[in-house]
Image: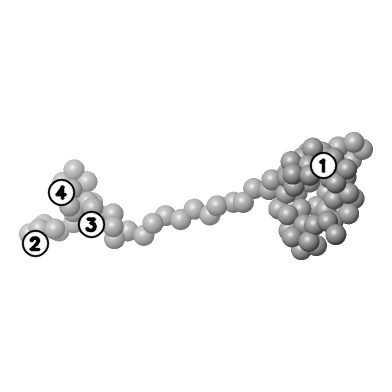
Amino acid sequence: MNANKSIEDHTPIAMLTVGELKRILEQSAPIETPIEKTKEYVRGLKGIRELFNVSHATAQKYKDGILKEAVSQQGRVIITDVEKALELFNKKGGVR
């Protein structure tokens, strides 16, 4: 910045040089926006099969066994919370 020139809040941006503008931007704190983690779900036994790359019979065993806490079922509709399913699978060690 020039020694003769003082930059204040009311100084128009058009009056700044590129170097002055760069310095001002480098000094300002970055704006951080919180990132919301969205839940991911899979549907049905097909979703479990694809998530764990297993057969239909194995997906059924997982649903009724190690993934029970991650699975919600209303009638024929099956929804599985992916994050919780992976956590349970890793904790319980998969098929024994």
| Secondary structure of residue under mark 1 | loop
Image quadrant in which you'd find residue 44? top right
Residue type marked 2: Ala
Residue at the (78%, 61%) spot, across then down: 93
- Determine which residue is flagged by label 3: 23
Residue at image x 18%, y 48%?
Answer: 18
Q: Who comes first in sequence, dot 2 or dot 4?
A: 2
Q: Are marks 2 and 1 in contact (CB under 8 Å)?
A: no
First-in-chain label (3 vs 1): 3
Q: CA distance from mark 3 to mark 2?
A: 15 Å
Q: Give the alpha-carbon distance from disc 3 to disc 1, as whole Å.
A: 59 Å
For residue 48, above or below residue 32: above
Whole-angstrom CA distance, mark 2 to mark 4, is 13 Å
Q: Which residue is mark 1?
A: 55
Q: Amino acid at mark 1?
A: Ser
Q: Residue furthest left?
A: 4
Q: Quadrant of the N terminus?
A: bottom left
Mark 2 closeness class: few <14, some 14–19, many ≥20 residues within 10 Å: few
Q: Which residue is mark 4?
A: 17
